[in-house]
Each structure stands twice: as C-alpha cells, then as structure tokens.
Image (cartoon, rainbow, N blue to C red):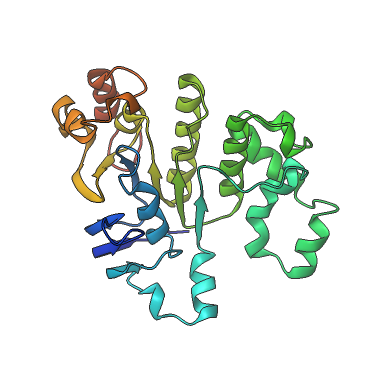
C-alpha cells in the first residue's frame, strides 16, 4: 500500500490571536517519505502534525493530502480519509483499566464493523497480531497486562504498536521517545522506520532528540516560533543551525550535541531508506 503525500501552502494556525502556532508554513512531503520535525517547545510541532492529520483546519493557507483538500470533503469522505492516517499523540489516550491487547487492537477499529469492534472488548480476536506488534517494541510480555500497570515509556510503545496494526498509509507521531532511555529510544526509532519502509507508509515524527533525528531520518525539518528554519538532509545540518534553532532553549537539548556520529550514521543511509553495507 502506497503512502500518502502532503502539501501545505502558507498554512497558518492561531490558538492565540497575538501569536500564530504555525505561521505561513509551506512544505511538501512525498508519499513514503520519513521526516523528523525538531525544535524547542512551543515551536509548533504538534500543531503541524494536527494540520497534516486533518484534525485541525488552518485559519489561513491550504493543506492537500494526496492532492485532495480534506476540508472540501463531506463528513463521510473526511472520515474515510482520516482512516488512512494514524495520529499517535505524545500522551496516548489509553483507558487505565483496559488490557494492553485491547488497546493495541483499537488500531484495527477502522477495519471492523460495529459488532466485531464491540465483541473485541470482551474477547480480542486478533491477539497474535497485537503480540507481534508489541514484540516489535520488546513488549510482547505485556499483552495481557492492564494499561494502568504500565510505565509512561511502555504506554508510548503501546501507542506505537497500535499504529503498526492500523494499516495506515501515513503515521503522524508526536514525541514517541519522551519517556525512553537512549538505547530504547534508538531501538524504537529503528523499528518504527523499518515498519514504514517495508510497508511504504509515510512517516512524520516530531522529536526532541536531535541526535536521533539526525542519525535515522533522511529529512529533518527545524521549526521555531511556528516557522520553518531549515528543511534539509542531516548531512547539511551542522552545530550552528541546531544552536540557532534552540537559542534560548538550550536546556531542551537533553544531551550534548554529537553531530559527527549522527552524521556518520545518516550518510550511511541510502535512497529508499536502506543502510549501506
């Protein structure tokens, strides 16, 4: 299944009349691309993902998804388009008493009828599918656990497992690594990228972890104050650009910048997302 393409032209969103959350952003994301979005808190990363996911309509400018304006569709058509997307928020809305298997299989609801969806709450019918998705993120042993027994990082990975079973053509993922240690964050990022590359899905992922973005993604967009500061391949993004992007918010860079090792890994990524050697 091919991924979805996105195109914004001068897209602007204002939560506060005095200051736009995103300000006249113009960009194009091709079907099947993997894109990281970085920048300090309040830069507009989550708002941009909401716009791309057709859950937030720009106050000015336009968005097209596969050359279609989602806001020109009727209600049924818009729901069908949204079913081809998967939005994974930073704090996934997982009911605390729900079992993990049910939380993961919620990603399949768009493919089921109402009766099957209701029955799955009592007797999950695709437990193996849920297990395989969880095992991708080293969580297979949590299949029958309750959500309220999970750590914050485990809940984030359950949300990503839900994304894997959804069969979506585009994944819009907001800060999936916030509660993970560096080793687990690296493993999780690789698993997410591998899934999208193998299935041809488009991936747009907002990250605070600059080194992770530079090491694993072929394209990185830097946002600050709702505008695009840079949009380039990692090999062309240097320390100076990163420091300018985070000027005044340096404490958000969780670790000292290590651009060179990140670039070494990034250069090894060939077109199509396969690693050389």
Examine the image and state in which quarter residue 193 appears. top left
Identified at 54% across, 72% down, the residue is: 79
Identified at 52% across, 57% down, the residue is: 168
Q: Is residue 56 above or below residue 241?
A: below
Depth order, front residue of 271/180: 180
Depth order, front residue of 259/224: 224
Identified at 73% across, 42% down, the residue is: 96
**Residue 192's x, y, as percent?**
48, 39
Q: Is residue 128 above or below residue 243?
A: below
64 left or right, relative to 83: left
**Residue 190's x, y, as percent?**
45, 32
| Count of numbered marks | 0
Identified at 66% across, 46% down, the residue is: 94
**Residue 31's x, y, as percent?**
35, 57
Q: Quadrant of the C terminus?
A: top left
Depth order, front residue of 233/246: 246
**Residue 78's x, y, as percent?**
49, 74
Q: Residue furthest right?
A: 122
Mark yes or no: residue 3 visible: no
Depth order, front residue of 166/20: 20
151 left or right, relative to 56: right
Q: Is residue 253 above or below residue 102?
A: above
Mark yes or no: residue 135 visible: yes
């Amino acid at each position: 299944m091919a991924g979805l393409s996105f195109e914004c032209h001068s897209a602007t969103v204002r939560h506060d009349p005095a200051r736009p959350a995103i300000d006249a952003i113009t960009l194009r994301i091709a079907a099947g691309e993997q894109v990281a979005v970085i920048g300090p808190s309040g830069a507009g990363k989550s708002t941009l993902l909401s716009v791309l996911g057709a859950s937030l309509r720009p106050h000015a400018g336009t968005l097209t998804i596969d050359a279609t304006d989602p806001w020109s569709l009727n209600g049924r058509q818009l729901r069908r388009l949204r079913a081809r997307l998967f939005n994974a928020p930073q704090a996934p809305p997982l009911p605390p008493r729900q079992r993990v298997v049910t939380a993961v299989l919620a990603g399949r609801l768009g493919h089921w009828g109402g009766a099957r969806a209701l029955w799955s709450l009592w007797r999950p019918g695709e437990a193996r599918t849920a297990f395989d998705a969880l095992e991708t993120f080293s969580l297979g042993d949590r299949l029958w656990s309750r959500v309220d027994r999970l750590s914050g990082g485990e809940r984030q990975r359950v949300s990503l497992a839900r994304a894997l079973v959804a069969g979506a053509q585009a994944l819009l993922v907001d800060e999936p690594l916030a509660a993970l240690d560096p080793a687990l964050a690296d493993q999780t990022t690789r698993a997410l990228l591998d899934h999208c590359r193998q299935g041809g899905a488009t991936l747009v992922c907002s990250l605070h972890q600059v080194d992770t973005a530079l090491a694993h993604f072929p394209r990185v967009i830097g946002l600050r104050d709702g505008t695009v500061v840079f949009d380039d391949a990692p090999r062309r993004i240097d320390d100076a650009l990163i420091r300018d992007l985070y000027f005044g918010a340096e404490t958000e860079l969780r670790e000292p910048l290590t651009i060179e090792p990140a670039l070494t890994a990034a250069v090894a990524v060939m077109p199509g997302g396969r690693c050389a050697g």
